[in-house]
Amino acid sequence: MEAWTADGPDDNGYGLVFRYQDNDNFYYYEISSDGYYSIGKMAADEWEILVGWSESDLIRLGRQTNTLRVECDGPRMTFIVNGYQIEELTDDDFEAGSLGFIAEAIDEPGVRVHFDNLKVWATE
């Protein structure tokens, strides 16, 4: 999936929600326009941070387009940004589910994010 900030502050978050069960159970993977990423989950209506906001030179800054990808194989999840692996985790709370988008303002309002070219496929 490609995504970019169209408006608002660079201190933001945007990305993917995946293995979504319901509003109380899902994983998320997001980046920010100022070069950070975070991975976590909502489990039984409780937030759990798997990787707190961490800086990465792999993330394109500002209004540039970033390509995000999550590869899930059983409990193993590989997180990719712009063609490079940024993190790999193992967590077996949710093995399947729906996919969606996330966008958030951190301290200042006005964040507007565009998402494009979402592709989903299953491997065997």
Image: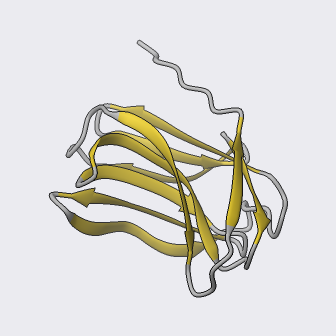
Q: How many marks?
A: 0
Residue 114 image position (x, y, % from top left): 72, 51
Q: Residue at x 29, y 31 (%)?
A: 96
Q: Which residue occupies the extreme front position in the image?
A: 110
Judged left or right of residue 89, residue 68 is right
Q: Residue at x 51, y 75 (%)?
A: 53
Q: Residue at x 52, y 20 (%)?
A: 121
Q: Nearer the viewer, residue 38 or 22?
A: 22
Q: Which residue occupies the extreme top position in the image?
A: 124
Which quadrant is the C terminus positioned in? top left
Residue 89 image position (x, y, % from top left): 38, 51
The image quarter in which residue 7 lies: bottom right
Residue 15 image position (x, y, % from top left): 57, 54
The image quarter in which residue 59 lies: bottom right
Q: Nearer the viewer, residue 119 or 104?
A: 104
Residue 72 drawn above or below residue 38:
above
Residue 29 drawn above or below residue 56:
above
Judged left or right of residue 45, residue 108 is right
Q: Which residue occupies the extreme left position in the image?
A: 44
The image quarter in which residue 94 lies: top left
Which quadrant is the N terminus positioned in? top right
Q: Nearer the viewer, residue 45 or 48?
A: 45
Q: Colour mode?
A: secondary structure
Judged left or right of residue 85, residue 9 is right
Residue 44 image position (x, y, % from top left): 15, 58
